[in-house]
Amino acid sequence: MGLITCQDCQSQVSDRAQACPQCGGPVGQAAQQAPAAAMTCPECETVVPKRAKFCPSCALSFSPAAQARREGVQTIEKTGKGLKAQVALATVLVVLGLVVAGVGVKVGLFPVTVAGLGCVLFGVLWRWSARISIWWNHG
């Protein structure tokens, strides 16, 4: 087993590999069969391999995230997982409170019913608070 140089990124690759593990470019027999694809760096106009991750001259990243930042793509969903989790937990608390209150009414235990309704009230207030926080922070 020998090492050859990838034509796209110049890293050392096994001669048995079909593609370079660094850049995904074809190597060995696959490179001879595939036509050499190239693109021009939008920043410095250097010709670079089509599968390059960055420009070797100006270090401009070709990743989809970097390209989106350059093009001014805006993220739509800004709500964090913490606020979403609070809404979910508050909803679960409301449902559990309803179940406990229902059991308390059916069994005839007033303190259990009051505890269940307290959970419902707290869950509703918590859910409203989380939803207002989402609206306030992320409009």
Image (spheres, rainbow, N blue to C red):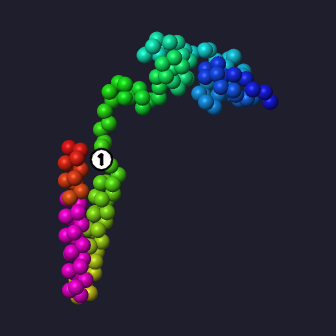
Q: In the rendered image, which quarter is residue 126 located in?
A: bottom left
What residue is shown at x 28% (from left), y 81% (from top)? 103
The percent position of residue 29, horizontal first and vertical second, equals 72, 21
For the C terminus, the quadrant is top left
The percent position of residue 136, horizontal first and vertical second, equals 19, 48
In the image, farthest residue toward the front: 58
Judged left or right of residue 51, residue 122 is left
The percent position of residue 104, horizontal first and vertical second, equals 25, 83
Evaluate whether residue 93 shows in this view: yes
In the image, farthest residue toward the bottom: 108
**As rendered, which of 44 and 53 lies closer to the eye?**
44
Element under label 1?
A: loop
**As rendered, which of 30 and 130 lies closer to the eye?**
130
Q: Main secondary structure of the magenta part?
A: helix
For the N terminus, the quadrant is top right
62 is higher (above) or lower (below) than 96? above
**As rendered, which of 17 and 106 lies closer to the eye?**
17
Marks counted in the figure total: 1
Which residue is label 1 attached to? 79
User: How busy is the neighbourhood of tag 1: few (under 14 within 10 Å), some, or many (20 plus)?
Assistant: some
Q: In the rendered image, which quarter is residue 91 located in?
A: bottom left
84 is higher (above) or lower (below) than 124? above
- Give, as a single range, the part of the protein colored magenta: 109-128
What residue is shown at x 31% (from left), y 42% (from top)? 77
Q: Amino acid at mark 1?
A: Thr
Instruction: Find out whether residue 122 is within the magenta segment.
Output: yes
The percent position of residue 79, horizontal first and vertical second, equals 30, 47
Judged left or right of residue 110, residue 50 is right
What residue is shown at x 63% (from left), y 31% (from top)? 21
